[in-house]
C-alpha cells in the first residue's frame, strides 16, 4: 500500500482513539454530575466512534485499484461513509431529545459540578486538536471522509462548550431546567450536522460536477490548446472521493494523422493531471469540419460549446 494511503488510515485510527477517550471522559462526567446535558454530549461522542470506524473502512476501500467489477475503483466508498455518519448523527439526536424531554418532565438536580466540568473540558480539548488535524489533512488529500470526520469532531467541541457553559449557569443559578433545555439544543444542532453530511454524500453519489475552482483550472489548461484549428466541447467532470474524472471531446483538423491527434490528446491528459492531481481524463477525438462532430455539444459545460 502506498505511503499516502497508510497516512490517511493513521488519521482514522487517531480519530478512533480520540472518540474512545472522549466517550470515557464524558460518560464519567455525566455519571458524576447526573447532568443530561453532559450525557447528551457523551452520546454524540458515541456517534464519533462509529463514524471513525466507518471512515477507516471507507478509506481502506477507496484506495483499492480498479477491478473487473469496479472499473473506476471504489472512491465513492467515502461518500457512503459520510452518509452512514449522517444517519448515525440522526439516531444520536433522537436519543438526546428523548432523554432531554424525560428530564424536563422529571427534573433531577445536578451534583459535583466542578469535577464534571473539568473532565468534560479535557475531552473537548482532545476533540479540538484531533478535529483540526483531520480537517486540514482531509482538505490536503481531498478526502471527504477525513474532512467530514474532522468537522464532526469540531461540531462536538462547540456542543461541549455549550454544555459546559450551561451546566456552569445551572451551578450558579440553580435553574435545573436549563440542563434539559440545553440538551434539546444539542440535539437540534446535531440534526443540522447530520443533514449537511447526508446532502454532501448524496451529491457525490449522484456524480456532482467538480468544484468551480477545479473547473476553472481545467478550463485554463484546455484554453491553452485552442490554436491551429483545435477546438473542444462536451466537457464534463465528476469526482469519487479523492479521484477526479474529466471527459472532453477534442476537435482537430480532419487532415491530421491519427498519431498527431493522439499525441495532442495525450499531452492534454498529462497537463490536466499535473494541474489537478488524482485526475483521470477521457478524450474523444473528432474532425472539426464534420457537422456530426457538433451533434453532442449539449453535453457538459456551456463555455465549451461550439456553434
Image: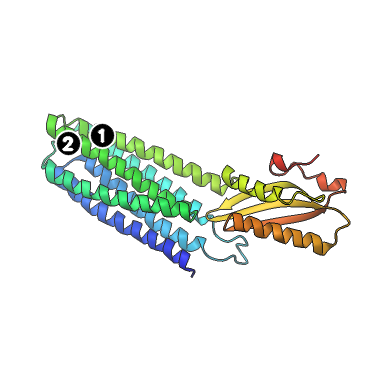
The structure residue drawn at horizontal position 65% and vertical position 57%, both measured from the top left corner, is: 271
The answer to whether residue 61 shows anywhere in this view is yes
Q: Is residue 151 above or below residue 272?
A: above
What is the C-alpha distance between the residues marked 1 and 2? 12 Å
Q: Which mark is residue 182?
A: 1
| Left-right relation of 270 to 65 | right
Residue 265 lies in quadrant: bottom right
Q: Nearer the viewer, residue 270 or 88?
A: 270
Task: Bin the neighbour count of mark 1 within 10 Å (Cα to Cα): few under 14, some 14-19, many 20 and up.
Answer: many
Question: Where residue 30 sits: x, y (%)?
Answer: 19, 45
Left or right: 124 in relation to 149:
left
Q: Residue at x 55, y 48 (%)?
A: 204
Q: Residue at x 83, y 62 (%)?
A: 258
Residue beneath disc 2: 168
Rendered location of residue 226, percent (x, y): 75, 49
- In the picture, measured across the screen, residue 112 lies left or right of residue 18, that is left
Q: Helix or strand or loop: what does disc 2 sit on?
A: helix
Question: Which secondary structure lies at badge 1?
Answer: helix
Q: Quadrant of the C terminus?
A: top right
Q: Nearer the viewer, residue 184 or 133?
A: 133
Q: Dot 2: few (<14), some (14–19), or many (≥20) neighbours within 10 Å?
A: some
Rendered location of residue 25, percent (x, y): 21, 52
How far across and down, in percent of the image, does residue 221 sit?
Answer: 67, 51
Q: Earlier in the sequence, mark 1 or mark 2?
A: 2
Amino acid at each position: 500500500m502506498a505511503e499516502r494511503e497508510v497516512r490517511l488510515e493513521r488519521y482514522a485510527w487517531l480519530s478512533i482513539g480520540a472518540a474512545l477517550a472522549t466517550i470515557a471522559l464524558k460518560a464519567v462526567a455525566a455519571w458524576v454530575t447526573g447532568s443530561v446535558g453532559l450525557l447528551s454530549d457523551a452520546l454524540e461522542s458515541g456517534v464519533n466512534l462509529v463514524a471513525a470506524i466507518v471512515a477507516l473502512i471507507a478509506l481502506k476501500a477507496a484506495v483499492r485499484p480498479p477491478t473487473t467489477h469496479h472499473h473506476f475503483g471504489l472512491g465513492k466508498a467515502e461518500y457512503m461513509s459520510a452518509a452512514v455518519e449522517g444517519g448515525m448523527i440522526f439516531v444520536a439526536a433522537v436519543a438526546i431529545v428523548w432523554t432531554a424531554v424525560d428530564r424536563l418532565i422529571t427534573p433531577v438536580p445536578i451534583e459535583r459540578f466542578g469535577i464534571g466540568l473539568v473532565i468534560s473540558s479535557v475531552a473537548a480539548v482532545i476533540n479540538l486538536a484531533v478535529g483540526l488535524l483531520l480537517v486540514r489533512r482531509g482538505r490536503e488529500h481531498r478526502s471527504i471522509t477525513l474532512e467530514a470526520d474532522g468537522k464532526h469532531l469540531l461540531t462536538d467541541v462547540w456542543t461541549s462548550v455549550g454544555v459546559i457553559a450551561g451546566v456552569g449557569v445551572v451551578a450558579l443559578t440553580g435553574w435545573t431546567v436549563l440542563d434539559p433545555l440545553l440538551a434539546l439544543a444539542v440535539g437540534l444542532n446535531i440534526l443540522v450536522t447530520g443533514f449537511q453530511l447526508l446532502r454532501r454524500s448524496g451529491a457525490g453519489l449522484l456524480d456532482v460536477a467538480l468544484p468551480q475552482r477545479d473547473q476553472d483550472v481545467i478550463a485554463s489548461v484546455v484554453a491553452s490548446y485552442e490554436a491551429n484549428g483545435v477546438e473542444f466541447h462536451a466537457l464534463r467532470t465528476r469526482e469519487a472521493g479523492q479521484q477526479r474524472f474529466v471527459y472532453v471531446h477534442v476537435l482537430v483538423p480532419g487532415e491530421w494523422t491519427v498519431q498527431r491527434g493522439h499525441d495532442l490528446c495525450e499531452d492534454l491528459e498529462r497537463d490536466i493531471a499535473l494541474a489537478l492531481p488524482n485526475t483521470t481524463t477521457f478524450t474523444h477525438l473528432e474532425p472539426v469540419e464534420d457537422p456530426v462532430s457538433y451533434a453532442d455539444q449539449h453535453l457538459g459545460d456551456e463555455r465549451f460549446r461550439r456553434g
